[in-house]
Image (cartoon, rainbow, N blue to C red):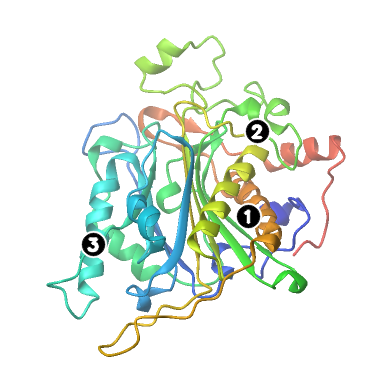
Amino acid sequence: MRARDLGIAIGFGRPGPNNAITDVDGVTVGHTTLIEGDGPMLVGHGPVRTGVTVVLPRAAGSWAEPVYAGSHRLNGNGELTGLEWIRESGQLSGPIAITNTHSVGVVRDALVAASVSRTSNPELWWSLPVVGETYDGVLNDINGFHVRPEHVDVALASAGPGPVAEGNVGGGTGMICHEFKGGIGTASRLVAEVDGGFTVGVLVQANHGRRDWLRVDGVPVGTAIDHRAVPSAWDDGDEADDAGDRYSRGLPPPGSGSIIVIVATDAPLLPHQCDRLAQRAGLGIARAGATGGHTSGDLFVAFATGNRFPVRVPGAPPVQELRGLVDAVIDPLFMATIEATEEAVVNALIAAETMTGRDGHVAHALPHDALLEVMARFGRGPRPGLA
């Protein structure tokens, strides 16, 4: 279930055929989802509520060919490896992966191994993978290190075009968003032919925000569906809970989570333009109610597939021809990024299902019927037949 299945349209732009990051030609997505055990947590044994998600800019067969890329941070209390080389070179090679906070290292190493296995000259090959994280320790045995190299391999092998699974899948399995169950979400926008006819796709791992901040298409859903209506994942609806008590039970304060945003486009953008596109993801999550607070890791990466980078052969000229978008006409791409990011967050919330994790902690799904009632109350009734 997604926003448009409920008749909820975010913004004014037109989505692509899958309304997903995979609408950008060549981009593929894969997940490995790990759900195991119930009850009290025993470190190393579970319960397990975690996974890994991979986004491949040029599909499985073209890791060696880079894409132009850029990045941005709203608040930097998080990790997205490999950004220093993106900032230096303006290029991204290979997949982007997202997982939980304490599994970044093993996922990064697994991507290095996968990259080496795909090159014809492994003795000289090097890799600086891009791996992001958000914290799933409220629901998951995060210190049990349950994500292993083979799980990355499965996600890579499963990566494909077309519709993308959302909610409690992959890296988003144990995530919480605006105190509802969160996770993976995606959306896309088609830029009008007069503005280039490009596609922009976004994928998020949403694990951020407080209940009272949540907005859906501008409607204050979070205050309307408060803790009395649906208990918070952080305090199980006990409004008397204070921060000290939450910490004693291993529960950080509401609003302390993070979000990773991946933006893709087939426009022929140069690295500085990818930086600018990544920056606009912050406006998309802000429209859904994010604030980039001190304890949040809001990290964004954008890549553009519109230029090709042929492998240089000995004796060939050391110059390649590139295309570039005129900066004066980049606004439609900005708006597409903002809308697709906002809708991806909403899709993550709507797709996610209630999950009980370690020690009985419950992250409740955003109830669809209550959401539609609130939207109608504010004049945003369902719009049938949305693509």
Instruction: Residue 284: give x, y in percent of width and height.
Output: 63, 45
Residue at image position (37%, 77%) is: 62
Q: Report the Cα–Cα distance between label 3 and label 2.
A: 38 Å
Q: Quadrant of residue 113?
A: bottom left
Rendered image: mark on residue 337: 1
- Give the residue type at disc 3: Val
Rendered image: mark on residue 214: 2
Residue 185 is at least partly visible in this image:
no
Q: Quadrant of residue 218?
A: top right
Q: Quadrant of the N terminus?
A: bottom right
Secondary structure at badge 1 equals helix
- Give the residue type at disc 1: Thr
Task: Specify few, some or many for label 2: CA neighbours under 10 Å numbering under 14, 14-19, or 20 or more.
Answer: many
Instruction: Residue 384: give x, y in percent of width and height.
Output: 83, 58
Instruction: Residue 111: give x, y in percent of width and height.
Output: 27, 61
Residue at image position (56%, 52%) is: 276
- Sequence-wise, the earlier of marks 3 and 1 is 3
Which callout, 2 or 1, points to the residue nearer the camera? 1
Secondary structure at badge 3 equals helix
Instruction: Residue 377: give x, y in percent of width and height.
Output: 85, 35
Task: Specify few, some or many for label 3: CA neighbours under 10 Å numbering under 14, 14-19, or 20 or more.
Answer: some
Residue 210 is at least partly visible in this image:
yes
Left or right: 18 as drawn, with respect to 220: left
Residue furthest out toward the right? 379
Rendered image: mark on residue 112: 3
- Give the residue type at disc 2: Leu
